[in-house]
Amino acid sequence: MGGETMTHTGIKLRIRPEYEGRQTFKAILFHPMEDGTRRDPRTQARIPANYLEHVAVSIDTRLCFEAALSAEISRNPFIAFTLARPVMEGQILRVSVVDNHGRERIFEQSIRFDENATFFYNEPEKDTTVPRLAPRTGPNCPSASR
């Protein structure tokens, strides 16, 4: 993948028991999801496109969830689904994300449940130098002053 690393992605996820013994997977993928049309308010330079195109979740080697994303998805996408089969302690959870530059980031962790039968994993964003931009405004975007 060109030796480059994807520095703007972190993840926070949880697997927990729900109704009738089913388990749900919920995750927030911390990513700016820039579509390439906005400008930096200080320099007026165009902010380059930087968004996730693909996410896959597998347990051990079994693919559980796969989705194609695009630039139209909001910052820090949230994904959730119900697992078809129960997850067991010690299995390996793998979340793979690929951005629009072809860079892949893999989060891999052995599953360990707490006393509430919940698995929790948090890996924050690696790069905190991403500029904090003003919210999007326009006729189709709600503004904070409305």
Image (cartoon, grey):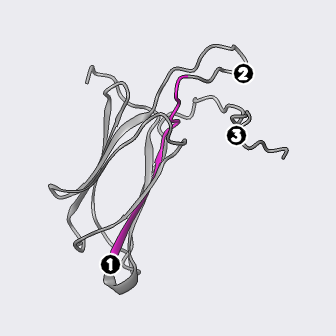
Residue at (77, 42) in percent of width and height: 143
Instruction: Tell me if residue 135 comes above or below residue 110 in the rendering.
Output: above
Image position, residue 14 (x, y; %): 41, 64
User: Residue 38 or 97: which is nearer the viewer?
Assistant: 38
Q: Determine the CA span between mark 2 and mark 3.
A: 17 Å
Image position, residue 134 (x, y; %): 72, 33
Q: Is residue 35 magenta?
A: yes
Mark 3 sits on what residue? 141
Outermost residue, front direction?
139
Q: Quadrant of residue 44?
A: top right
In this image, 87 relative to 26: left or right? left
Mark 2 sits on what residue? 41
Instruction: Tell me if residue 142 comes above or below residue 99 in the rendering.
Output: below
Image position, residue 87 (x, y; %): 24, 71
Which range is magenta?
22-36
Q: Quadrant of residue 24?
A: bottom left
Q: Determine the CA span between mark 1 and mark 2.
A: 47 Å
User: Residue 138 or 7: which is nearer the viewer?
Assistant: 138
Instruction: Judge the density around disc 1: few (<14), some (14-19), many (≥20) Cα neighbours within 10 Å.
Output: some
In this image, 45 relative to 90: left or right? right
Q: Quadrant of residue 121?
A: bottom left
Callout 3: SS:
loop
Number of dots carrying numbers: 3
Mark 1 sits on what residue? 22
Outermost residue, left direction?
61
Callout 3 amino acid: Cys
